[in-house]
Image (spheres, helix red, strand yellow):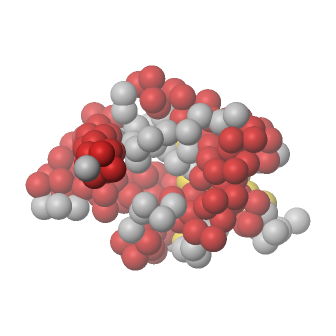
Amino acid sequence: MSQRLLLHICCGICAIGPAQALSDRYEVVGFWANPNIQPAEEYEARRASARESCRRLGIHLLEDTGCTPSFWRERVEQADKEGKRCEECYRVRLEQTCRAAARDGVRFVSSTLLVSPHQNMTVLREVGLASASAYGVCFIGESFRSLFAECHRRAREWGLYRQKYCGCLAGKREAEEKRRKDEQGRVR
């Protein structure tokens, strides 16, 4: 059997492409660690979507409950003042993933965040490599962006919940503001 890989899953949609691509080389185990997702109803909708996606993909999903939203906020609050909110958010979630992999004897880790064109690939890879190094595991930082459209097509086909923002309340406000500006631009 191939070696195991712990795949941080941010949502059910983004899990589809990376899990399938990595399954060619690894025994993929999903890992739900997303204390950034707010409010609670959004968190539950995304977790249910991740569970359904993993069920359909035939991969086991571990759920980390050790990191609370308050811990996440404490870590991200100062970084936000420095304009590094997303970087610290990646760090919190990827550290959780790498810690769990090391604890469970899993050598490889990756993240479904690598499929999204909305994420900063350079920063995500840097954080992933640093987190993996700190825990003695290997971060697989390949881009899955070419699979993004297919993930969304399959998610619609499967009836998965499709979120409208990255996860945190600041991200929600930013996405809503962008949609308002886009709509105003179309009206003119």
Q: Residue furthest top?
A: 41
Q: Where 77 falls versus 105 (above or below)?
A: above
Q: Residue furthest front?
A: 188
Q: Position of residue 41 (x, y in %)?
A: 45, 23
Instruction: Classify residue 127 by image quadrant.
Output: bottom left
The residue at 44%/72% (across/down) is: 121
Q: Can the viewer see residue 149 in this picture?
A: yes
Q: Position of residue 52 (x, y in %)?
A: 71, 35
Instruction: Classify residue 123 by image quadrant.
Output: bottom left
The tally of labels here is: 0
Instruction: Assign the N terminus to one quadrant of the image.
Output: bottom right
Observer-nearest residue: 101 or 115? 115
Q: Residue furthest right?
A: 1
Q: Position of residue 43 (x, y in %)?
A: 46, 31
Q: Can the viewer see residue 71 in this picture?
A: no
Q: Residue furthest left?
A: 81
Observer-nearest residue: 159 or 52? 159
Q: Where 183 falls versus 129 (above or below)?
A: above
Q: Position of residue 182 (x, y in %)?
A: 31, 50
In the image, 71: left or right of 32? left
Q: Where 120 falls versus 44 (above or below)?
A: below
The residue at 31%/57% (across/down) is: 86
The residue at 81%/69% (across/down) is: 24
Instruction: Classify residue 165 by image quadrant.
Output: top left
Observer-nearest residue: 125 or 97? 125
The residue at 31%/62% (across/down) is: 87
In the image, 10: left or right of 29? left
